[in-house]
């Protein structure tokens, strides 16, 4: 019998019985839940309770050695020298032309000990970036299981579990605590724009962690969620996603598919004052010319029809395209992330969208008015408290 193409994650044995719709999707060679029973109910677990999402398939690279800090700082657009041990940061990284290869979170576990969490396999690229330095790069993806615990009740749930220190972590803080045979690393990070944490354990401790959390479900509103509910939350938060908002620079076929950090709304994560990092000179030139020709924006869309893949127009002229779209249950708005020509990226700009949808097995089209807005639609204060 041939082995399965997709591997089960360390939490699969607990998630599979809960997946009443048997809806799965691939994630970097792993099986992950798409929706378990109700996308809407799962979504409200994120926004009103405590949600659990299996992030074990996340790619994780460990960089260690005497010059590891120099290597990470050379790769990232952010000034990593300002990142102290026990803290996490978000950053893109670019090729020599200043085009984004990917973005993710960097954990500084020690003075010269880093973990880079990302969505794409980039081991060869990181190894090439570390060539000539005293820095070892290792793929430890299979050695770590992860759960995203997100929602306004996530802190209270950690307190219920006796992880008071984890519950009190500052925003983007991380710390290791006693749990199981190898301990647990808790980070104040997530992809929902809400209060949340990510819990990282050895695969052999995964089911014990799951069972301890689920023992608390009589105290807390806990929902296990799939990728669809998470996607709605990340669009509301204005978080970009690789292969949705941009194509990785090293995989793009055409120059027009590539994006710079400025074109993805990540200019705040580019520190041009540090002397060396990949793509710095190209980004300086781009900014001197007035910025990228295309920009990421948020848009409010008339009506309730999600505008997935819709083209955007100024009159009859095509000026952009929707990259990710959803109806926001918490905001009661039809929202989307889109890439538009720079001249139309100013908040308040009015455009129109050509939206296609299926109606009684036939494809229908509607034109809706669109207003450009800030792409961070939902930013509750409690996410940073």
Image: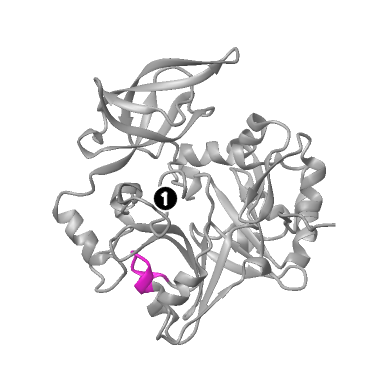
Q: Quadrant of the N terminus?
A: bottom right
Q: Secondary structure at mark 1?
A: loop
- Tell me, yes or no, whether the highlighted magenta stretch contains residue 19: no
Q: Determine whether, in the image, residue 306 is placed left or right of residue 277.
A: right
Farthest residue toward the left? 289
Residue 216 position in % (x across, y down): 77, 48
User: Residue 258 placed where, x, y %?
Assistant: 34, 51
Q: Vertically, is 297 above or below 246?
A: above
Residue at x 31%, y 30% (from the top left corner): 372
Q: Is residue 312 visible?
A: yes
- Which residue is the site of mark 1? 247
Residue stretch rendered in magenta on the structure: 73-83
Q: Residue furthest top?
A: 360
Give 98 or 110, whichever is nearer the viewer: 98
Identify the residue at horizontal 59%, vertical 43% (top origin): 151
x then y, percent, for residue 335: 43, 29
x, y (%) of residue 110? 51, 78
Asked whether 331 or 156 is in front, the reply is: 331
Total labels drawn: 1
Mark 1 closeness class: few <14, some 14–19, many ≥20 residues within 10 Å? many
The answer to whether residue 334 is left or right of residue 165 is: left
Identify whether 14 is placed above or below 44: below
Q: Is residue 215 visible?
A: no
189 relative to 38, above or below: below
Quarter of the image for residue 145 reads bottom right
Q: How is the image coloured?
A: one colour
Name the residue: 79% across, 55% down: 212
The residue shown at (25%, 27%) is: 349
């Amino acid at each position: 019998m041939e082995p399965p193409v997709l591997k089960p994650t360390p939490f699969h044995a607990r998630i599979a019985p809960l997946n009443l719709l048997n809806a799965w999707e691939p994630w970097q060679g792993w099986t992950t839940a798409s929706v378990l029973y109700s996308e809407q109910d799962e979504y409200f677990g994120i926004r009103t309770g405590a949600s659990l999402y299996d992030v074990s398939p996340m790619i994780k690279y460990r960089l260690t050695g005497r010059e590891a800090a120099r290597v990470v700082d050379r790769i990232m657009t952010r000034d990593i020298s300002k990142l102290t041990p026990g803290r996490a940061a978000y950053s893109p990284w670019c090729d020599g032309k200043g085009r984004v290869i990917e973005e993710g979170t960097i954990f500084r576990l020690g003075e010269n000990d880093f973990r880079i969490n990302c969505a794409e396999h980039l081991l060869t690229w990181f190894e090439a970036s570390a060539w000539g330095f005293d820095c070892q790069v290792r793929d430890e993806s299979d050695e770590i299981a992860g759960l995203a615990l997100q929602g306004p009740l996530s802190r209270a749930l950690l307190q219920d579990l006796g992880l008071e220190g984890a519950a009190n972590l500052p925003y983007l803080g991380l710390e290791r605590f006693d749990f199981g045979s190898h301990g647990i690393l808790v980070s104040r990070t997530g992809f929902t724009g809400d209060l949340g944490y990510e819990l990282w354990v050895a695969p052999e401790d995964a089911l014990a962690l799951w069972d301890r959390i689920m023992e608390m479900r009589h105290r807390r509103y806990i929902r296990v969620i799939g990728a669809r509910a998470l996607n709605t939350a990340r669009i509301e938060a204005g978080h970009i996603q690789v292969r949705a908002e941009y194509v990785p620079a090293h995989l793009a076929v055409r120059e027009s598919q590539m994006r710079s950090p400025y074109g993805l709304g990540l200019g705040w994560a580019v520190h041009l004052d540090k002397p060396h990092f990949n793509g710095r000179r190209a980004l300086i030139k781009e900014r001197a010319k007035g910025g990228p020709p295309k920009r990421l924006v948020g848009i409010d869309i008339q009506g309730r029809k999600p505008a997935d893949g819709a083209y955007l127009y100024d009159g009859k002229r095509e000026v952009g395209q929707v990259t990710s779209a959803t109806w926001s249950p918490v905001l009661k708005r039809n929202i989307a992330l889109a890439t538009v020509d720079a001249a139309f990226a100013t908040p308040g700009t009015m455009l129109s969208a050509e939206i296609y949808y299926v109606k009684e097995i036939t494809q229908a089209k509607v034109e809706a008015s669109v207003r450009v807005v800030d792409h961070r639609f939902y930013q509750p204060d409690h996410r940073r408290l």
